[in-house]
Amino acid sequence: MYVVVMGGGRVGLNLASFLISDGHDVTLIENDENLCTNAAAELDALVICGNGTDTKTLEEANVSSADVFVAATGNDEANLLACILVREFNIPKIIARVSEPSHGEAFRKVGIDSVISPEITAASYVEKLIIRPKIADLVVMGKGDAELLDFNLENEKVVGKKIGDISPTDDFIIVAVYENGDITIPKPEIVLKKGMKVSILVKTKAARAVMKRFTK
């Protein structure tokens, strides 16, 4: 997959690095010379020092061949303009970063549906770890309406029960269990044990009730 990332700051640089590690081809566009130099030294990718809101720069990045374009600068106005320009190249997927949540609607009005805010996502993640202290880890899924929770079983009401007797429901499903560091895909006959680590995919609205059901 070929991805063009505009923005060589923290978000853009990390994203490009992850994509490259996964074997994808990446071109990074950045207009700050210092950030360009830093990116060129860190990434095994083409780094273009130019303005992503300039059509010539986009053409230099061969954006017409991109599978995905990501506007990842910290400037919402620049990201919006770049997204409008790259729409003319008929790229299959365009993703925009927004720093100010209220700006998200402006992106959607011009047809950019994949709008993300790393800052808000990070804050939401920390908030969930605080209000659900028994969670070992979590992943927010979909559009924030589902979560993948990791925690250790504590509630005696579920200990000793077979997975098939309690999962799945309309609100959650046990998707993995761990014993002695090994992961097992759940089977209905597996018996839940106290202290066993489990991963549960749960609707966000039911997360608190599900946590209460499986922990003290």
Image: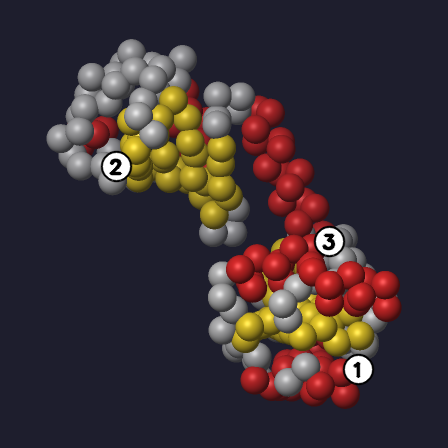
Across and down, in percent, residue 197 comes to: 35, 26
Q: Is residue 40 left or right of residue 147?
A: right
150 lies left or right of 80: left
Pick whichever of labels 1 and 3 is earlier in the sequence: 3
Most extreme residue toward the front, as rendered?
41
Q: Report the residue marked by disc 3.
A: 10
How packed mark 1 is, by other alpha carbons closer than 10 Å (few <14, some 14-19, many 20 or more), is few
Element type at marker 2?
Answer: strand
**What residue is drawn where x is 34% and y is 17%?**
195
Q: Secondary structure at mark 1?
A: loop
Point out which mark residue 54 bears. 1
Image coords of residue 80 (percent x, y): 74, 69
Q: Which mark is residue 184?
A: 2
Q: CA distance from mark 2 to mark 1?
A: 51 Å
- Mark 2 or mark 1, whichever is nearer to me: 2
Which residue type does callout 2 highlight? Thr
**Camera-side residue of 39 and 178:** 39
